Amino acid sequence: MTRTTARRRGAAASVLAAALLVAGCSDGTEPTPTTSSGSDSSVFTNPVVKTDAPDPQAIQVGDTWYLFHTNSGGRNVPVLTSTDLVDWTEAGDALPTLPDWADAGKTWAPEAIQLAPDRFLLYYTVAGRESGRQCVGRAVASAPQGPYSDDAAGPLICQADLGGAIDASPYRDTDGSLWLLWKNDGNAIGVDTWLWSQRLADDGLTLVGEPTKLLKQTEPWEGTLIEGPFFHRQDGRLLLFFAANAYDRAEYAEGYAVCEGPTGPCVKATENPILKSNGAASGPGHASMVVRDGRTWLLYHAWPPGQEGSTDPGRQVWLDEVTWVDGKPVVKGPTATPQPRP
């Protein structure tokens, strides 16, 4: 080894040592970036959140996006923030305190909606103590990141005789009406899994009228269940997106149906599933949809291939564009190569 090479290696080692020293001196109070966009600021590469962040949903308030996901890292409802949908920073626990009727440890699939400049509603799945099943609760905050508070004496929906209620998703239709979608957790007790819809009161705190069954598992690719529903209108048509099959298997995938209205009827697309496993990601699904500058994007979770069911890294968050061909959604993913940013 020449002296020049030795000096270069010595300098590199000094730089590395300095970097490690700085990292070791951190007091841990700075927000933790969950992903890096690399040196080219015009592109990004999936996954956009590299840690375990299942069932992602995001809302935009001002110039900031707020992403909520299933419990992890000791937080009931982890919340992350971003200005570009690509680089996300941890922002704490949106629901630090659960209501008295709920038990910790299984707080799943939270979704938020803004009803006024200082009023935000969070719908979440949690373990109901009395029923022994998963139930849906609702919580209120004055800021998008929370803290949200649930002051109800009991769950909003439980359906214990149908296995429980999970995966609530709020939706404001073009006429201003508020709706809630959810799934009865039938696969937990060996019965059908239906996607349900029901009108919400204008304040988002209570349900109005009676629930309506929209869809259940019927197709081979769906296995024994469908779940994770959300509504999206495109060019006047109301689309109902959903995930299907076992969440911890490569067969988990995403599909959609076309509905005449929030109470149906709904017809599944013949081209389902529109997002499924490939060499880049396994078991993609439980998605949500965002629109930025006229472009539509799907946020969803997926496992690294061959690591289905793991917790490290677990279900990472992926972001892929949706294009519309003759009114039908076409998802460009899962992708693992650089693509233009939103």
Image: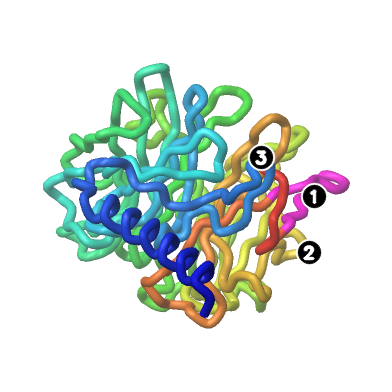
Range shown magenta: 321-332
3 or 1: tag closer to the N-terminus: 1
Q: Residue at x 44, y 74 (%)?
A: 191
State yes or no: discs 2 and 1 in contact (Cβ < 8 Å): yes
In the rendered image, is residue 174 in sight? yes
| 172 vs 131: above or below | above
Residue shown at the point (53%, 66%) measured from the top left: 302
Point 66% across, 63% down: residue: 336
Pointer 3 or 2: first along the chain: 2
| Residue at the spot of label 2 | 271
| Label 3 residue SS | loop
- Amino acid type, residue under disc 2 in the picture: Glu
Q: Residue furthest front?
A: 3
- Which label was assigned to residue 342? 3
* Residue 152 picture quarter: top left
Q: Is residue 173 magenta?
A: no
State how far apart marks 3 and 2 are (Cα): 26 Å
Q: Quadrant of residue 45?
A: bottom right
